[in-house]
């Protein structure tokens, strides 16, 4: 078995940890409302506007959300979900059920 030490330089993936949504319906509503998103390409699976972060593969958005690290500095996960719900409504006038808001982490790429 071959073991590689260090990082893989040709990797085209990015790790993320967000409070956000994975529902296609909600993501479509958010991307349609976010004027900065129009026809954007997800570089290494990540595209960030000043309003939101989008994560997926190529141009397929799997998740939309805000960096958990910033939200969780002074909030619990339930408080961060409440904050996200209010943020999406204030920014885009889109209501998101609390049950649809998740703590999401993983890896995405081109």
Image (cartoon, grey):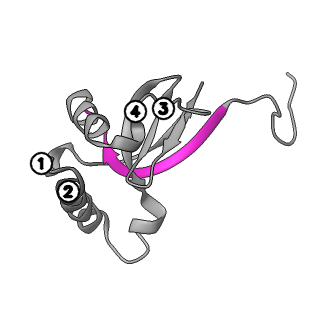
Is the Cβ of the residue at disc 4 closer than 8 Å to that at disc 1? no
Residue holding disc 2: 85
Q: Which comes sooner in the sequence, label 4 or label 1?
A: 4
Q: Main secondary structure of the magenta part?
A: strand
* Residue at 51%, 25% in the rendered image: 57
Q: In terms of secondary structure, where does tag 2 sit? A: helix
Residues at marks 4 and 3 touching, judged by CB atoms closer than 8 Å: yes
Q: Which mark is residue 95?
A: 1
Of tags 2 and 4, which is closer to the observer?
A: 4
Question: Which region is colored magenta?
Answer: 13-23
CA gap, disc 2 and disc 1: 7 Å
Q: Residue at x 62, y 33 (%)?
A: 44
Q: Are marks 2 and 1 in contact (CB under 8 Å)?
A: yes
x, y percent for residue 14: 61, 39
Q: Nearer the N terminus, badge 3 or badge 1?
A: 3
Relative image position of residue 91 (x, y in whole percent): 24, 56
Mark toward the start of the polypeptide (3 vs 2): 3
Closer to the N terminus: mark 2 or mark 4?
Answer: 4
Q: Nearer the viewer, mark 3 or mark 2?
A: 3
Question: In the visual, does 32 lie left or right of 96?
Answer: right
**Residue with the mark numbered 4:** 38
Classify mark 3: helix, strand or loop: loop
């Amino acid at each position: 078995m071959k073991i590689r030490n260090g990082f893989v330089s040709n990797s085209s993936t990015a790790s993320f940890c967000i409070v956000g949504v994975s529902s296609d319906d909600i993501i479509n509503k958010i991307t349609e409302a976010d004027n900065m998103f129009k026809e954007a390409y997800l570089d290494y699976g990540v595209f960030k506007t000043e309003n939101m972060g989008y994560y997926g593969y190529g141009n397929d958005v799997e998740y939309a959300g805000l960096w958990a690290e910033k939200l969780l500095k002074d909030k619990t996960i339930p408080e961060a979900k409440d904050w996200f719900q209010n943020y999406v409504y204030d920014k885009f006038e889109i209501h998101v059920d609390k049950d649809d808001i998740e703590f999401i982490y993983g890896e995405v790429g081109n």
